[in-house]
Amino acid sequence: MYDFLISPFIEYGFMRRALVGGFAMCLGAVPVGIFMTLRRMSLTGDAMAHAILPGVAIAYLISGLSLFGLTVGGVLAGLLVVALAGWVARSSHLKEDTSLAAFYLISLALGVLVISLQQSNVDLFHVLFGNILALNNAALSLLASISTISLIVMAVLYRPLVIECVDSTFLRRAGKSSAIAHYGFLFLMVINLVSGFHALGTLMAIGTLVLPATAARFWAQSLDFIMFIASTFAILGCYVGLLLSFHFDLPSGPAIVISMGIICILSILIGENGGLLRNRFQSRHLTG
C-alpha cells in the first residue's frame, strides 16, 4: 500500500509538484465553482474556458510556452469575451448566454486556427489538455498566487454573491453591488480557468470548478459544509488522478477529471442529500 499510495510522491519531485499545484488550483477554484452551480452558470463557465484559447494561442505564437505570456494572454482574452458578451446583451435583445455562446464559438475556432499555424500537434495537445506533471517552481508560484487572489476577492464578494443567489432582484435594487458582484465573479471565473489551463488545459480546466461543487451538493445543505466537502472532493480527485496517471501511464489531466467525475456520479447516486438510489429506497420504505 505504501508503494502504491505514498511512494510516488516521496521519490519523484515532479509528482510532488503536481500534487501541490493541484491542491493550490483546487483551493481557489472550488469556492468559485460552488457559486457557479448555485447561480446556474456552469455552462457559462465551460464557454469561458474555451474563450481564453485565442489569447493563449496568440501569446504562444509571440512568446512560445512562456508562463507569463500564456497567463496574460488567457486572462485578457477571457475578460474581453466577457465584456463583449455583456455589452451585446445590454445593447440588444439577445440574452447574455446567447451572446456569450456566439463569442465563445468564434474564440474557440480562432484559437485552434492560430495554434494550428505552428503545425505542431504536440503543442496543440499541450494547450488543450495541459500537463500537470510538467509544473515547475514558477508555475507553482503562479497557481498559488492566483489561488490567493481568488480567495481574497471571494471574501470581499462573498456576501453580495450569497444575497444574489437568494434574491437577485433585491441586490439589483440595492445599488451598484449587483454589477460589482457580477463582474467581480466573472473575473474570478476567468483567472481560475487560466489557473486550470496551466495544469489541465483549456478543455479540462472547467472540471475542477464544476464536478466537486456538484458532488458536494448531494452531501450537505449549508454553504459552509458544501465548501468544505467540495474542497475535500477536489483534493481527493487530484490525489487519486495523479496516482492513476503514474501507475497506469494515463494522461494526468483526464485522469484527475475522471476521478472527480466518479466522485460526482457516486454522490448523485448515494448522496445523503437527494441521492437517486437513496431516494428510491426511502420511497419504497415509506410505501411499505
Image: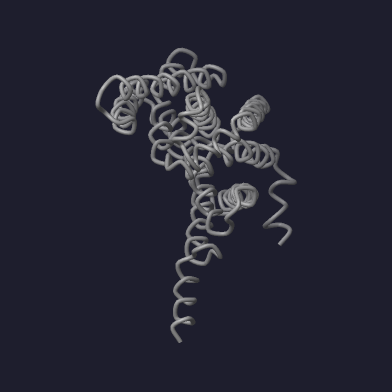
Q: Residue at x 53, y 34 (%)?
A: 196
Relative image position of residue 92 (x, y in whole percent): 26, 22
Taking the view exactly as shown, the residue that stands out farthest to the top is: 62
Query: Picture quarter containing residue 146?
Result: top right
Question: From where the camera sits, is residue 168 visible?
Answer: yes
Above or below: residue 43 compared with residue 197: below
| Residue placed most toward the observer, 166 or 18 | 166
Question: From where the camera sits, is residue 246 visible?
Answer: no
> In the figure, is residue 147 to the left or right of 113?
right
Relative image position of residue 87 (x, y in whole percent): 35, 19
Above or below: residue 235 compared with residue 133: below
Query: Picture quarter containing residue 53?
Result: top left
Quarter the N terminus occupies: bottom right
Taking the view exactly as shown, the residue that stands out farthest to the left is: 93
Relative image position of residue 207 (x, y in whole percent): 48, 43
Q: Residue at x 62, y 47 (%)?
A: 227
| Residue placed most toward the observer, 10 or 208 | 208
Relative image position of residue 36 (x, y in whole percent): 48, 40
> In the figure, is residue 109 to the left or right of 178?
left
